[in-house]
């Protein structure tokens, strides 16, 4: 007997007892039935076969080759084959037991392999427990491992017997080899037996202070195991977690944070002291740990730092989140404005300049490189961290990485797309450059297609809608009908969100109505219905067309939609509607319920509007409905009859029947299903399911005021954050002081800011990190002693001194640039010699400063220069000052130049004296557009002026504006708007200026200079510039006087969004040739009687749009060209006249939206 | 974290189960089967399925579903990524990851799963560490094992897990020291009906096979690193070095691994190596359709286009196709309506074409969609983006290794709409 067996004497005896008892029992029972357990165990012998035999059996099975399937098929066969096989079953298990009892390791191994195979197939092998467990201390490693597997699987069921193995593990915990200690702890903690909880607790505590980081890691893993076994140990476990959180090795970090998340995610206070360490270790932690740590830190940051988008969030909402704006109507705007005001007031109260906490910056900086990880989960974790925590301007970096993940497996795509869909709602601009990456391939699985469609729809805006719609057109032809249906819905959503393409979309959808596939037609009908609800007047012909469809289309939902439309807008189709009802009445009995309800609805509405024709029909329908099988329909019929057919009994309600039925219904809002999903932490299971999963930790809201940042300070004497922070504050105070009078603060100051730029600069610290990273990996050995640290601290001090000394020199030599380079190199070298912890703290330090220096990069540079000069000598500093002053003055002069001339000349445009024909003739003469400035070409037929503020609402102040069509010199992308202020009041008005400009994203305004005084009865003019971003969205702002504020808005006609360009005939033709297809819009028209000569046409077109004429050989055609102000897309207009006032208008423009609107405007100008 | 794992084959049988915490009954998979039935295509089973008490997160690889059972909140990508890692490991160990291979090696599979997760949290996923713990089965080793009675499980304890370079095992020795790098680029493109490119991008990877003694420290530099727009690295690559100098510096794992995957910036125009002339028409009323396809090389920089394979999902109405290839062979599966044409090498002098007729269901109206054409191809000795490796240096070891670099271009998701 070996020592081991002696130690396990008890188990062996116990096992023998158990075995004999069992075999007796089995001997009796198993003749009758082999079923030892309820779980299909009659086949358990089967899994114990030799692998070869197994294969044999399998190949004999059906082509599917499924193990389980074979069982099902074979089971009756075996049963039928008689008792012979039954007898062999217990024998087999006995075989295994015998093999396990034998002295040969190879036999044991063979037995264990078969048992593990049984477990793997889900067969019950629990009756072998005693035989297996006594091999727990087997010398053979593989046997031992397999025994562990078995033990962990069945210990819970056989708690008493499992106890027998404990002593082995306890011994293992004391082994000198760290790996044996670790594996003993691992198995011990995996045995789910409540009695050993105290032993486990003890083992974990001991292991948590083990020398080896690997054992400590295992201890961290054991914590959640114990917690799930006995939650009452929580308090003790938290102590262990706290201890392990302070561990400095990367090996432990991931595991302990995981334990933290499972046991006590609410104890965020435990993180404070370890926050900076975790941030710095992050990049070296194994990838799975990274995911857990990043997710936890996201939550942590949300509780500890201020919202970096505090000020911007206002803007964001001010622009209505882009999305709501399109859908909303005027009245909603008012609400929004009110809301905005409130929020502004709120924000005003706490409008302090936002300074990002250096720790916040540290987190963002240290996670960023992980976007390059090969592990999709890590990338996603960083992406969500940036989405939730980063300032708006920095979130963009994650887009590229997420798009990269789309190349991965389809499951990864699925999850990433879901998250991207949520992100695109909040931050559309981020993914816009990657629009094409979301294009759909025919080989994508349907669920991916639908998600990509969702993203594409979210990304659609005025500028890219044409490309997206073109792409959608190809999708509609797909064979995947679910996908086609989703595409049609997507088109519907684009149409509701982007008003300019609504007609185009509607036309496209109407064309789909003649599609052969019924599902496609049905889906289109439903979407068209929603779209029509927005502007029914204009589309009576579509309604007519749809009425015809009732003959063919069979899908109930579509039929119901059509009927609803006809009923709702029966006034627009007065002739057809009764006829449809007649047809429907005929087929009423055969319709689906949903259709029947709509037939009744239609009948009621028609009865109310056109009772003469439809009275009988309605009554017929109602009678049919009265005896319908469905009670809903019967009820509805009864209800409606009472309501619409006036009888003596009918109450007051019937008077209002018309109002009830024909009330104006609000148009449906087509919303993304991903709206508002971002209140779940992105990348989480809960977000994916849009429902809270068990154990989900809410992402807290940003705190109103930042909690005390000093809690994260670690007590390392020299290196506290506070000092650096204080330093910074000091500097801040000094800053204004030193821009006023330089030179005084002297070398210390400059040295300080020097060190800032040196240590804080990205490249410097970057390379330093790489150096320390690789070096430390080799030189570091897990635990380091306190002494070392102290030494290093001293080193550090020395170095600082050196640094300062060195830095003083360059200042004196006034070669700061070069020397700082050297200095940086020097630093790098020094740092490479240092070890891990030290460089960490060093980093921390540099970071705290860098966040500061980053924000004021340019400033500090200027400072450096100034100081340089100041150090050289005092006198030269004065000229510098003067220079800068001069510059400033010049600047302001320039500004005045821009603004001043505009008011006077433009009031009386000179060009009016030239007839239009002359202008065009001149154009023909000119050689290139460079010669003639656009301003002179601009036709100046009296500029149309619009009212901005009426005399009465303005309390005496009236304001008119016109688009002067002059280039706005401060910014060529802006449209010049000339405003004329007239003071009709008796008193003077002071301080006319504008405030509180509300704009769509991308738009910009250059305000007009304040008019200080406007005496009574006087008139003044001013020019402002607005960059409309090539859209006809209004610019809203407040016009303020010294007493009042007026809300006003300027909305440009589309024709003013362009500036004329000169093209030759050939150029024109060439450009036109490139803008065919989707970009060309042709419309036939009959010219107004007064507008049948060339001059009149030219005049009217140029009045409607700021275009210049293009010379043309034929007198039947007038051509005009221009470019949009913002994006310089070419706009080409051709008016071809024919006999008797007929004409054809062609507009070619890259921007479909602009083109469509321009066509409308010019049509209007030419026909009236 | 991950509670249990079930492996389900194509016919819906659970053929392996593994539990890391308490046992979850396999009846939980019924929810999965339900979803599987609902999905028309195997890849349309949603990866995440909520059930009353658990969540099922599944991955489909090699026609096997890997279904993980989750009990509480965990990032879904975490699980998905891990499951893919499991499959990769199996593939690495057994060569293929099929049901048969897993069943034959069920013990090794079990040992692997045991090492990869502890209490549902990933423990060792680096294949180098795993291989130290559990030796992959080879024919030789199984023979030796049966004779000598030794085992698959490493006798040594896994030191890799403790080292600072966890991806590399210690004490590696080779007689021939060699390092091979394959630069493989794939073109993803969608080509319009008219032949114009709607979107095209290049995704590339550098796969390495490094068999070097000791602890070599390698640096790999490119002639034109600016081309690489978006990169993701094996953990061994020193990120800061890349940021600062655009050099790949790393201590490689032993054996095969993926060093880098990258995306070539979209500003660069992507060369499309082939063009397709197609004329696929269905006439109204007749039960015949015409099929005419010609391939030709476009921008190949003088290299031959090889292993061309054209496949296309024809509309459902097509009963059969009677085609005539000028080279190669074609097959048409009348059940799935999948047409595939194995072209082989494109000869620029005599362009390969596939012409003929398709017979349609009699009386059925003409299909309103045209099939898209998927193309696979290979071009040897060229990276289409023009990426070139400048040099490979080794530090830390004395010997001189043999170095090799191979370039290849492939078509990724290359689609032509017709």
Image: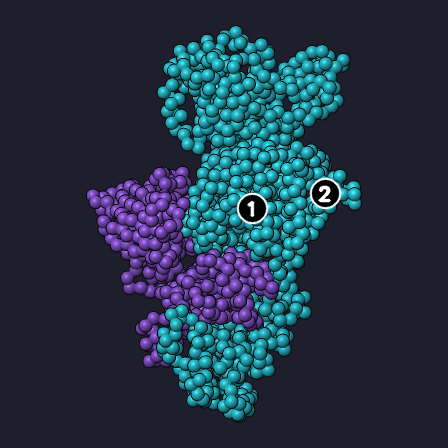
Chain colours: A cyan, B purple
Question: Residue A202: x, y in percent?
Answer: 62, 73
Residue carrying label 2: A645
| A51 up-or-down from A1019: above or below | below
| A169 up-or-down from A570: above or below | below
Instruction: Tell me what residue is drawn at x 64 percent, y 28 percent.
Output: A1036
Instruction: Tell me what residue is drawn at x 40 percent, y 62 percent.
Output: B62
Question: Residue A1161: x, y in percent?
Answer: 53, 23
Question: Residue A264: x, y in percent?
Answer: 64, 61
Question: Residue A600: x, y in percent?
Answer: 64, 46
Secondary element type, mark 2: loop
2 vs 1, front mark = 2
| A362 up-or-down from A49: above or below | above
Is residue A640 visible in this depiction of the protein? yes
Q: Residue A559 — which label? A: 1
Q: Upstream in the sequence, badge 2 or badge 1?
A: 1
| A1048 up-or-down from A470: above or below | above
Closer-to-camera residue (A608/B190): A608
Secondary element type, mark 1: helix
Residue A669 location, quadrant:
top right
Which subunit holds the residue at mark 2? A
Closer-to-camera residue (A1012/A554): A554
**A861 relative position to B208: left or right:** right
Closer-to-camera residue (A231/A983): A983
Instruction: Tell me what residue is drawn at x 41 percent, y 16 percent.
Output: A1116
């Amino acid at each position: 007997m070996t020592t081991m067996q002696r130690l396990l004497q008890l188990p062996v005896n116990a096992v023998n007892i158990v075995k004999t008892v069992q075999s007796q029992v089995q001997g009796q029972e198993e003749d009758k039935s082999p079923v030892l357990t309820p779980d299909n165990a009659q086949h358990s012998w089967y899994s114990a076969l030799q692998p070869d035999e197994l294969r044999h059996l399998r190949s004999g099975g059906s082509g599917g080759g499924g193990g389980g399937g074979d069982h099902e098929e074979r089971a009756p066969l075996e049963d039928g084959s008689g008792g012979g096989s039954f007898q062999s079953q217990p024998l087999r298990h006995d075989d295994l037991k015998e093999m396990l009892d034998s002295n040969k390791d190879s036999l044991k191994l063979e037995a264990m392999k078969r048992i593990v195979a049984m477990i793997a197939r889900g067969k019950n092998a629990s009756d072998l427990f005693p035989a297996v467990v006594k091999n727990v201390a087997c010398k053979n490693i593989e046997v031992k491992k397999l025994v562990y597997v078995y033990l962990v699987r069945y210990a819970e069921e056989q708690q008493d017997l499992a106890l027998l193995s404990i002593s082995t593990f306890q011994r293992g915990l004391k082994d000198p080899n760290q790996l044996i200690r670790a594996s003993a702890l691992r198995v011990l903690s995996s045995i789910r037996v409540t009695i050993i909880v105290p032993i486990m607790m003890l083992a974990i505590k001991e292991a948590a202070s083990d020398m080896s980081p690997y054992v400590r890691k295992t201890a961290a893993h054991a914590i959640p195991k114990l917690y799930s076994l006995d939650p009452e140990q929580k308090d003790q476990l938290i102590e262990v977690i706290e201890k392990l959180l302070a561990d400095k090795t990367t090996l432990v970090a991931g595991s302990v944070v995981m334990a933290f998340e499972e046991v006590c995610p609410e104890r965020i206070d435990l993180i404070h002291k370890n926050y900076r360490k975790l941030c710095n270790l992050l990049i070296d932690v194994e990838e799975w740990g990274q995911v857990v740590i990043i997710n936890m830190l996201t939550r942590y940051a949300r509780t500890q730092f201020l919202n970096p988008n505090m000020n911007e969030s206002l803007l964001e909402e001010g622009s209505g989140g882009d999305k709501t704006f399109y859908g909303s109507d005027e009245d909603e705007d008012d609400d929004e404005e009110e809301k905005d005001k409130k929020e502004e007031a709120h924000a005003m109260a706490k409008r302090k300049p936002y300074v990002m906490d250096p720790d916040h910056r540290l987190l963002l900086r240290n996670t960023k490189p992980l976007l390059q990880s090969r592990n999709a989960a890590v990338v996603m974790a960083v992406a969500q961290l940036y989405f939730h925590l980063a300032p708006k301007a920095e979130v963009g970096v994650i887009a590229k990485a997420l798009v990269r993940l789309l190349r991965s497996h389809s499951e990864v795509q699925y999850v990433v797309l879901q998250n991207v869909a949520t992100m695109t709602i909040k931050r559309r601009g981020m993914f816009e450059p990657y629009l094409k990456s979301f294009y759909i391939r025919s080989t994508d699985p349907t669920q991916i297609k639908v998600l990509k469609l969702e993203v594409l729809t979210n990304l659609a805006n005025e500028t890219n809608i044409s490309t997206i719609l073109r792409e959608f057109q190809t999708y509609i032809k797909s064979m995947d009908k679910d996908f086609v249906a989703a595409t049609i819905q997507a088109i519907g959503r684009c149409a509701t969100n982007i008003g300019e393409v609504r007609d185009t979309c509607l036309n496209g959808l109407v064309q789909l109505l003649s599609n052969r596939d019924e599902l496609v037609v049905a889906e289109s009908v439903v979407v068209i219905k929603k779209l029509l609800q927005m502007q029914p007047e204009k589309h009576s012909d579509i309604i007519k067309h749809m009425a015809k469809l009732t003959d063919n289309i069979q899908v109930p939902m579509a039929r119901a939609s059509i009927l609803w439309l006809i009923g709702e807008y029966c006034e627009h189709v007065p002739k057809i509607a009764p006829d449809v009802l007649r047809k429907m009445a005929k087929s009423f009995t055969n319709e689906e319920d949903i259709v029947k309800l709509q037939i009744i609805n239609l009948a009621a509405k028609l009865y109310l509007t056109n009772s003469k024709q439809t009275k009988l029909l309605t009554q017929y329908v109602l009678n049919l409905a009265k005896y319908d099988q469905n009670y809903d329909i019967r009820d509805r019929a009864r209800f409606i009859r009472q309501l619409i057919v006036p009888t003596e009994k009918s109450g007051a309600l019937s008077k209002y029947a018309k109002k009830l039925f024909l009330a104006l219904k609000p148009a449906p809002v087509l919303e993304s299903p991903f709206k508002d999903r971002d209140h779940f932490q992105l990348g989480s299971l809960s977000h994916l399911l849009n429902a809270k999963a068990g154990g989900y930790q809410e992402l807290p809201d940003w705190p109103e005021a930042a909690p005390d940042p000093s809690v994260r300070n670690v007590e390392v004497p020299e290196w506290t954050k506070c000092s650096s922070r204080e330093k910074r504050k000091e500097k801040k105070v000094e800053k204004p002081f030193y821009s006023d009078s330089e030179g005084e603060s002297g070398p210390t100051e400059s040295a300080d800011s020097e060190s800032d730029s040196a240590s804080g600069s990205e490249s410097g610290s970057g390379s330093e990190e790489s150096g320390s990273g690789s070096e430390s990996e080799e030189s570091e050995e897990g635990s380091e002693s306190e002494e070392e640290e102290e030494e290093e601290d001293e080193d550090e001090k020395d170095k600082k001194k050196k640094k300062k000394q060195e830095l003083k020199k360059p200042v004196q030599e006034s070669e700061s640039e070069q020397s700082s380079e050297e200095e940086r190199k020097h630093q790098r070298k020094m740092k490479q010699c240092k070890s891990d912890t030290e460089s960490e703290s060093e980093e921390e330090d540099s970071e705290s400063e860098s966040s500061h220096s980053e924000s004021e990069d340019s400033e500090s540079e200027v400072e450096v220069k100034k100081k340089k000069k100041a150090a050289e000598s005092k006198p030269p500093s004065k000229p510098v000052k003067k220079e800068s002053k001069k510059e400033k003055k010049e600047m302001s002069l320039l500004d005045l130049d821009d603004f001043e001339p505009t008011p006077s000349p433009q009031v009386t445009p000179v060009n009016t004296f030239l007839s239009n024909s002359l202008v065009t003739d001149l154009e023909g003469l000119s050689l290139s557009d460079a010669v003639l400035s656009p301003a002179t070409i601009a036709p100046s037929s009296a500029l149309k002026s619009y009212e901005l503020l009426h005399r009465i609402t303005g309390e005496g102040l009236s304001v008119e504006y016109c688009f002067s069509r002059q280039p706005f010199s401060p910014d060529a992308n802006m449209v010049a708007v000339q405003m004329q202020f007239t003071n009709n009041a008796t008193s003077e008005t002071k301080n006319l200026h504008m405030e509180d400009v509300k704009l769509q994203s991308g738009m910009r305004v250059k305000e007009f200079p304040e008019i200080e005084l406007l005496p009574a009865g006087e008139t003044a003019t001013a020019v402002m510039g607005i960059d409309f971003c090539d859209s006809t969205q209004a610019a809203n702002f407040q016009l303020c006087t010294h007493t009042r504020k007026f809300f006003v808005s300027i909305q440009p006609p589309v024709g003013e969004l362009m500036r004329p360009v000169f093209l030759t005939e050939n150029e024109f033709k060439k450009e036109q040739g490139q803008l065919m297809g989707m970009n060309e819009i042709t419309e036939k028209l009959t010219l107004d009687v007064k507008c049948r000569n060339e001059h009149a046409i030219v005049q009217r077109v140029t009045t409607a749009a700021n275009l210049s004429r293009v010379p043309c050989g034929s007198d039947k055609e007038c051509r005009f060209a221009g470019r949009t102000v913002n994006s310089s897309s070419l706009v080409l207009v051709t008016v071809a006249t024919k006999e008797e006032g007929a004409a054809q208008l062609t507009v070619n423009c890259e921007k479909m939206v602009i083109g469509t609107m321009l066509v409308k405007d010019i049509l209007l100008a030419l026909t009236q | 974290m991950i509670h249990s794992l079930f492996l389900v084959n194509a016919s819906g049988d659970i053929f392996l189960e593994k539990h890391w915490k308490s046992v979850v009954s396999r009846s939980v998979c019924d929810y999965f089967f339900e979803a599987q039935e609902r999905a028309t295509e195997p890849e349309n089973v949603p990866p995440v399925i909520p059930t009353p008490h658990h969540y099922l997160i599944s991955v489909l690889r090699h026609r096997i579903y890997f279904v993980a059972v989750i009990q509480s909140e965990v990032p879904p990508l975490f699980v998905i990524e891990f499951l893919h890692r499991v499959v990769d490991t199996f593939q690495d160990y057994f060569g293929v990851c099929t049901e048969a291979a897993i069943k034959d090696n069920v013990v090794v599979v079990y040992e692997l799963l045991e090492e990869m997760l502890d209490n549902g949290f990933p423990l060792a996923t680096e294949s180098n560490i795993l291989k130290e713990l559990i030796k992959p089965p080879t024919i030789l080793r199984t023979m030796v094992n049966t004779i000598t009675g030794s085992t698959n499980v490493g006798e040594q304890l896994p030191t890799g897990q403790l080292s600072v370079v966890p991806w590399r095992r210690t004490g590696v020795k080779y007689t021939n020291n060699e390092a091979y790098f394959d630069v493989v680029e794939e073109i993803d493109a969608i080509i319009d009906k008219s032949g114009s490119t709607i979107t095209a991008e290049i995704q590339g990877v550098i796969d390495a096979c490094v068999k070097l003694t000791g602890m070599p420290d390698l640096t790999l530099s490119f002639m034109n690193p600016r081309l690489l727009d978006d990169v993701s690295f094996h953990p061994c690559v020193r990120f800061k070095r890349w940021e600062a100098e655009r050099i790949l510096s790393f201590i490689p794992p032993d054996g095969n691994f993926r060093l880098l995957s990258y995306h070539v910036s979209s500003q660069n125009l992507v060369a499309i190596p082939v063009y397709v002339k197609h004329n696929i028409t269905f006439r109204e009323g007749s039960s015949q359709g015409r099929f005419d396809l010609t391939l030709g090389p476009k921008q190949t920089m003088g290299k031959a286009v090889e292993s061309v394979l054209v496949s296309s999902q024809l509309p459902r109405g097509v009963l059969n196709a009677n085609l005539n290839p000028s080279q190669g062979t074609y097959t048409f599966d009348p059940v799935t309506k999948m047409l595939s044409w194995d072209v082989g090498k494109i000869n620029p002098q005599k362009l390969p074409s596939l012409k003929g007729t398709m017979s349609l269901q009699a009386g059925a109206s003409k299909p309103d969609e045209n099939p898209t054409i998927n193309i696979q191809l290979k071009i040897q000795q060229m990276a289409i983006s023009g990426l070139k490796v400048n040099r490979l240096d080794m530090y830390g070891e004395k010997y001189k290794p043999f170095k090799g670099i191979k370039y290849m271009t492939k078509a990724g998701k290359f689609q032509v709409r017709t």
